[in-house]
């Protein structure tokens, strides 16, 4: 079964690679796709539906939309689109928009708080619909933007995982578009005739937000240095802990020696041999 276009074939290939590399979808999975009506989530549910009919394993899909309650949000478009394409779906109406005003701290980024609140709703719904995986539409650009956001503004060297098990172990979140660029997701959603709708949040699209500033920075650098985005993503799979300053990953000589002494006293000579030597 051939794909409709070279673009669809490319997106399918990258998504399949991510599924295999990170063991994102397994036989018998019921995958709940978080669908906001934006280009990324539309691209995700569409390509997973294509792969579902071609994959050597059996898995099912359900598209779930969490309506934050903002006025004029076109949740009906999502319901109609899913119905017309034969996708099982569910619309969950909430009052997250109103809660945001009450709990958002000064100078805090509304998008991250909104995402956490919606994630909580998705966890609840996953249990109700029997989902074994929760698929989110984060793409390559999201991964590297998050890396720089944490580096610049949070003092942490971290991004996001392609596969994440919740703290209580009950839910598994997957991000199958990790290798797909934002531009590809945008073009694919358009190519498949998926109507893009906004979340209607007052802060949506505000270029003063930190993420938007980082996005512009990466875009400019990619123009100057083609391939930079893929290099940054590769860096997330090529971590060298000994070249960082976190002593939890690379203990100081004094700490290493104390550990070696304790092991020696316990007679654990075999374990002592695998400790890194002093330099």
Image (cartoon, rainbow, N blue to C red):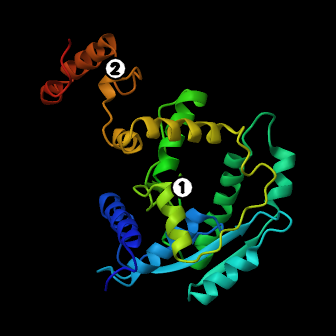
Residue 186 vs residue 110, the one in the foreground: 186
Which quadrant of the view contains residue 226?
Answer: top left
**187 to 85, vertically: above or below:** above
Residue 169 vs residue 184, the one in the foreground: 184
The answer to whether 107 appears left or right of 240 in the picture is right
The answer to whether 49 appears left or right of 208 in the picture is left
What percent of the width, then of the height, locates residue 185? 50, 63
Q: Which residue is mark 1?
A: 168
**Quadrant for the C terminus in the image:** top left
What percent of the width, then of the height, locates residue 67? 75, 68
Which quadrant of the view contains residue 261?
Answer: top left
- The residue drawn where x is 74% and y is 74% is 75
Q: Earlier in the sequence, mark 1 or mark 2?
A: 1
**147 to 91, vertically: above or below:** above
What percent of the width, then of the height, locates residue 74? 77, 73
Q: Residues within 10 Å of mark 2 (few under 14, many from 20)?
A: some
Q: Residues within 10 Å of mark 1 (few under 14, many from 20)?
A: few
CB atoms of marks 1 and 2 within 8 Å? no
Task: Looking at this view, name the residue that lies furthest to the front.
Answer: 224
Q: Circle 2 sits in a helix, a strand or a loop, which is it?
A: loop
Q: Which residue is mark 2?
A: 251
Q: Circle 1 sits in a helix, a strand or a loop, which is it?
A: loop
Residue 2 vs residue 66, the one in the foreground: 2
């Amino acid at each position: 079964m051939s794909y409709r276009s070279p673009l669809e074939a490319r997106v399918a290939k990258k998504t399949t690679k991510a599924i295999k590399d990170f063991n994102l979808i397994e036989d018998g999975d019921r995958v709940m796709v978080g669908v906001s009506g934006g280009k990324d989530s539309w691209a995700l549910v569409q390509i997973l539906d294509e792969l579902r009919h071609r994959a050597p394993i059996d898995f099912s899909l359900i598209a779930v939309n969490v309506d934050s309650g903002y006025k004029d949000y076109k949740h009906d478009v999502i319901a109609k689109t899913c119905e017309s394409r034969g996708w099982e779906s569910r619309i969950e109406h909430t009052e997250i928009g109103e809660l945001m005003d009450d709990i958002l701290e000064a100078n805090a980024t509304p998008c991250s708080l909104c995402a956490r609140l919606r994630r909580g709703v998705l966890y609840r719904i996953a249990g109700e619909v029997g989902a074994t995986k929760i698929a989110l539409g984060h793409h390559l650009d999201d991964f590297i933007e998050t890396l720089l956001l944490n580096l610049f503004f949070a003092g942490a060297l971290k991004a996001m995982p392609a596969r994440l098990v919740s703290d209580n172990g009950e839910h598994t979140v997957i991000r199958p578009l990790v290798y797909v660029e934002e531009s590809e997701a945008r073009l694919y959603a358009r190519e498949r005739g998926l109507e893009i709708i906004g979340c209607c949040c007052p802060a949506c699209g505000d270029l003063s937000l930190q993420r938007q500033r980082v996005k512009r920075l990466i875009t400019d650098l990619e123009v100057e240095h083609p391939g930079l985005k893929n290099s940054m993503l590769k860096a997330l799979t090529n971590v060298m802990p000994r070249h960082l300053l976190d002593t939890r990953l690379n203990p100081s000589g004094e700490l290493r020696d104390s550990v070696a002494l304790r092991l020696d006293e316990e007679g654990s000579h075999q374990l002592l041999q695998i400790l890194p030597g002093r330099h």
